[in-house]
Image: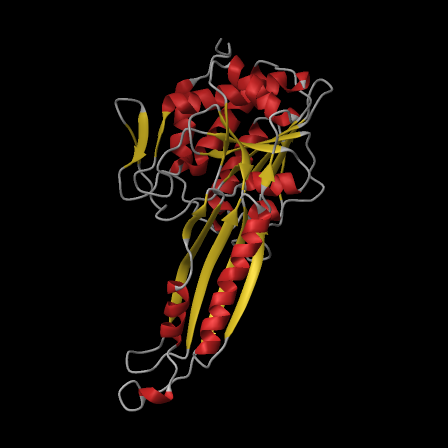
Amino acid sequence: MRGFTLIQTERLLHEFLELVKIDSVSGQERSICDALKGRLAALGLTVYEDNAGGAMPEATGNIVARLDGPQSGPRLLFCAHMDTVEPGRGIKPVVGAEGTVTSEGETILGADDKAGIAAILESLRIVIDEKIPHGGITVAFTVREETGLIGARSLDPSLKATYGFVLDATGPPGDIVVRAPSQDKIAATVHGRAAHAGVNPEAGINAIYVAARAIAAMNLGRIDAETTANIGVISGGKAINIVPDTVYLEGEVRSLKKEKRAEHTALLCGIIENTAREAGTRAEIYTELLYDGFDLQEKAPVVQVAVHAAIRCGLAPSLTQSGGGSDANILNARGIPTVNLATGMENVHTTRERIRVVDMVDLTRLVIEITRSAGMF
């Protein structure tokens, strides 16, 4: 049985198209933040912007908005992020005849994560207009999710909710991410010794060569079914006639098992250190746990809420795991049981990104049904 709330598809689509036209690459979310604060306030929510952006003049904080409920029951948290990846400036959305939204092709679309934002806004309108009873709703629109969940990590620790729902997963609506990895960041500076590349290269130690040998010795990519590793940044050198004396590397390790993550991070760091030592030089290495993983059981109430709502909407609920982190990682670590709901977005972080209008409608209906039925659990 599909949920009985009638979604205003044209209003939802119009909102989404307007949102993706607002430039909001990570660290530059001011315009969309102001627009969303206005929309939420107009709906009657209590809205504030926190100081996650710091003290810089153009910095932008997270939006936190509250709607008190007419009845006792669980407080729900709905979360999506405002920022996008590059190329994300001057987006021109196109609605195809088959009901699929894409960009013109030179940029991403921004469905990641403005489809989630649009669904939350439309859901709020309907919950308010239809006076759907609930125990209270908190909305969090975060900044700089794409650069390490920075906004969510800066959310006020006093933010409380019974259940959390992040709208930021790939897959069809009805897919529910209940398991996601933790992630380590690795940053290393490999030192060498400068020399003239043509006159006396023997006097130098080529830092780029040392770093390349270290990377060649690493096990990267898919390590096993639960673990991945990557070196994603390398920079160094000053000129082609100078033996480079430093090179900088950045990488990551993720795993659904924290023990595997820690073990592989230590392995990669050891390779860098040993390779530098064998070359007669040294490396400075910095590691940071960016976020913890989460693993919610099928019987967890927040999972049951999402599954029940999906069935009520005529969707096929599927409990899945993700290889990526999301704001759900941070919220779970904060003690708010949180699942990540699939939005229907496809080919994210590419110029082939797309989303079907019907999936945005189903996502909106799912959020409404979660609001309607959460008090049963």
Q: Which picture quadrant has residue 94?
A: top left
Q: Which picture quadrant has residue 79?
A: top right
Say left or right for 35 vs 215: right
The answer, for residue 21, to whether it is visible in the render is: yes
Depicted 303 relative to depicted 91: above or below: above
Say left or right for 356 vs 254: left
The structure residue drawn at horizontal position 32% and vertical position 82%, both measured from the top left corner, is: 242
Say left or right for 330 vs 36: right
The answer, for residue 291, to whether it is visible in the render is: no
Depicted 214 relative to depicted 64: above or below: below
The image's colouring method is secondary structure
Could you say which is closer to the camera, residue 69 or residue 160?
A: 160
Say left or right for 82 vs 98: right
**Residue 260 coordinates in the image, percent (x, y):** 55, 50
The structure residue drawn at horizontal position 38% and vertical position 31%, both measured from the top left corner, is: 17
The structure residue drawn at horizontal position 57% and vertical position 13%, both measured from the top left corner, is: 130
**Residue 30 coordinates in the image, percent (x, y):** 49, 46
Count the numbered circles shown.
0
**Residue 115 coordinates in the image, percent (x, y):** 44, 31
The structure residue drawn at horizontal position 50% and vertical position 71%, both measured from the top left corner, is: 273
> Furthest residue to the right?
72
Depicted 299 relative to depicted 353: above or below: above
**Residue 362 coordinates in the image, percent (x, y):** 45, 20
Depicted 20 relative to depicted 149: above or below: above
Q: Quadrant of the C terminus?
A: top right
